[in-house]
Every structure is written in C-alpha cells, then in structure tokens.
Image (spheres, grey):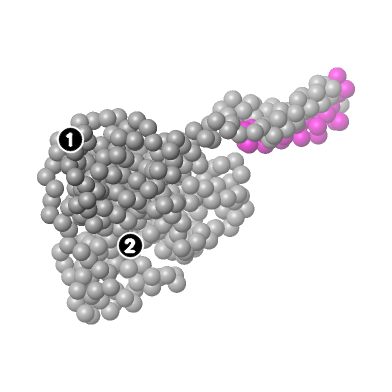
Amino acid sequence: MSIPVNSLDDAVEVAKKAVKFDEEGETNIAAYYYEAAASLLEQLAPVSDSEKAEPMMASAKQYKLRANDLRMKTPNEGRIKGDMNNMMAKRCYFLLQQAIEEDEHGDKQDAIELYAKAVEYITQFPDLIQGDLKSLTLQALDRAEDLKGIKKHQPTRSSQPLHSSTANSSLHEKSTSSAKPVPKPKQAFHRASNVNLQGAGNDTYSDEEKEVLLFTSHINKRDYVPFMSIDLLEKFQYSMPFSDQAGFLTLAPKQKRDFYKFVRPEELCSDPCIVFGSVPNYLNIKQTVISDCSFVASLAVSASYEKSFGKKLVTAIIFPQSKDKQPLYNPFGKYMVKLHINGIARKVIIDDSLPIDKFGRLLCSYSSNKNEFWISLLEKAYMKVMGGYDFPGSNSVYPYLMSCNNNLNE
C-alpha cells in the first residue's frame, strides 16, 4: 500500500520544526510540534507498507516521549531566582534614579519622600544590598537626612547631591558626568485648579474652550483629560507593580481564540527596553491579529520620520523619560502616553500587561527585537482610548497619525 506523499512530507516538516524549537529552548512550542508529528505518523502507519509502518510507529513513540519530557520539564529554579533578583535590582535603581532627579530639580520635599521610599524598598531585599547598590543606598540615606536638616556633615561619607548618571551607570556601562548646578524648585501645580489648566506649552484656555474640553474628554465611558504641564511631574514608582484601575483591555475575537494570559515585559525577556537604540526603527514593527492596520501604518510613518529627520514623534510621547528625553523602561509597569485625541493632546495611563498565547507569543503588535516594547505600549494606549483591542478599526491612516502626534499636518 502506498503512502500519501503529501502527508509524509507534512510529518517530516512538522518534525523538523519540533527539533528546531527544541534546540532553541522553546519547550512548549517544541512539545506541540513533537505531538503533532507523532499524530501524523500514527495516522500514516496503518495505511503504509508494513516495512515502513514499524519505523513510523517507533518514531512516533520517540516524539511522544520527548514531548512528554518537555511538558514535564521543571523550570530552572536558579535561573528564575536570578531573573527575580535582576528585576528587583532594576526596581531599586529606578527608585533611586527618580529620587536623584527630583533632588537635581530642587524639589526638596519630593526628593526626601522618594529617597525614603527607595531606601525602604531596597532594605526589603538584603541579598541585593551590596556593591554599587549598597553605596548608592547609603548615599541616598545621607542625602535624605541632609535635606531634612537632621544629619550632621561627616567627612567619612559624601553629603553632596547625587546625580542621576550615578544610578544609570549601575544599570548600564559606567560613564563619567560633570556636576550640574541645581535649578530652582519647580512651581507646584494642582489639576483641580482651573487656573492651572495649561497645556505642555505656554498657552492657557478660555472658559469656553474649557467647557468644550470637558465635554470631549469623555471617550468610550472613560475620561481622558488634556495633557498639562503638571503631568510632566507624574509619579511612576510604587512599592509593587502598577496595575491599571481600568483593568485588562477587552480582547478582539481572534485574540480570544488563542489567548492564554497577560504578562509583563520582564516575563518575556531578561532585559526589556522601550526603544532599542537612540531612535525607533519602523522595520521592527510586526502586526498580529488586531484590526488596526492604519494605526500600525501611522507608527511606521512616525518612526521613519523621526529616524530620517530627528524630529521626536514617537519617543516624545512615552513617559517616564530620562534627562535626555528618551523613554525609560519602568520596572514598576506604569506608563503615560501623550495622544492627540479630539483636537488636543491627552493623557493616557496604562500598565505594561500584554496578551500572549500558550506558546508565549504576543497577541498584539510587537517589535522584531524581542527586548523592545514601544510598539506594543503605544498600540495598547490607543486601543484603551478606542475601548479595547476589539475596536472596529478604520480605513484611514490620517486619524491615527494625528493621534500619535499633531506635528505632522501634511
């Protein structure tokens, strides 16, 4: 009895994929393909010549055993502990960096509060308090006491203001930086006051404009207030990972079909970042099952423009940011995105939870660089305003392009 050639070829191709993913360490995906290859061979064996059926069943048995081994494979506890320690260290450095930047800006009370939070958080993990982190923590404690006026100057330890480059150098390669003069304290703002209803620029709004803004701020059952100067002071550090009060976004039908769970970037890679390099690369954009082709196209246009002409269209709308206005990865998971909606720049707060399938693949637009997340986060911010990943979509690129940035009017 002859073997269906196409079916045998399919089994061979599936087996090759299983071996490939097995070698790459993708255990769940490899197990799936091993099981699929075994199933195909078991279906082929009864309708094949007896001399070929026996090797097929033997191969199928081996594939099933390997799949079972991969399914039962326990995670490497040492690696998991190492990943957790790495994430805790990143959060510690992030807190210190935020405190130092407030100190450099002359915000005494905020700096004291952030230094205290940083020290309190770091002391929860005694195993991590060593080397550079220990030195920074002691300096932060001294600086907080100096700002409070309860610390006497001691020659054994520096009481000068720390610099944010000190915290940054502990996460990346160390670099020298000169001390900068501390600017005057920033003016305090309160969103509740109409007097302070001011955009990121210098223009204020009339009473009529404020009424219009109030009316147009209610979008898809949520309020998205205009982006104001006070929002540049948004706090991004917490004692635990931030979760959006609005909850997870509603999934699109095709996402629901393959959905497994929501994860954060640190669960997908060991060293996540927002933008890999100094500028975003539109060639890294990959779309999946969400019907937002126009929005993805607008991201590509904006990223290409920024790379070609140096005009910050993508990197300028993602917060938190470093001193040189580059978006920062926040290990506490909170981000603020500035989107131009209903005629004005608006503030959109999101967390960094993203949907994946059972093989760990993102079910949203993503970057071909697995460590880069600006694409997924910007898409999530826009999908939140639109009501969820299941929004109906659009055929026009222009509204999406204007949402990303109002500087591209042509």
> Between residues 258 and 298, which one lies in front from this camera angle?
258
Examine the image and state in which quarter residue 227 appears.
bottom left
Identify the residue at horizontal 59%, vertical 41% (top origin): 359
In this orientation, does residue 84 appear?
yes
Please identify the quadrant where the N terminus is shown: top right
Q: Amino acid at mark 1?
A: Pro
In this figure, which residue is indicated by the disc labeled 1? 155
Identify the residue at horizontal 41%, vertical 57% (top origin): 350
Identify the residue at horizontal 21%, vertical 79% (top origin): 207
Left or right, 206 with respect to 19, comes to: left
> Between residues 297 and 6, which one lies in front from this camera angle?
297
What crowding class fits label 1: few (fewer than 14 Cα within 10 Å), some (14-19), or many (20 or more)? few
Foreground label between 2 and 1:
1
Q: Is residue 49 above or below residue 90?
A: above
**Tag 1's secondary structure?**
loop
Residues drawn in magenta: 27-51
* Magenta-drawn stretch contains 391: no
Left or right, 122 with respect to 26, comes to: left
Examine the image and state in which quarter residue 228 appears.
bottom left
Q: Amino acid at mark 2?
A: Lys
Q: Which mark is residue 101?
A: none
Q: Which mark is residue 347?
A: 2
The spot of residue 379 in percent (x, y) is 42, 53
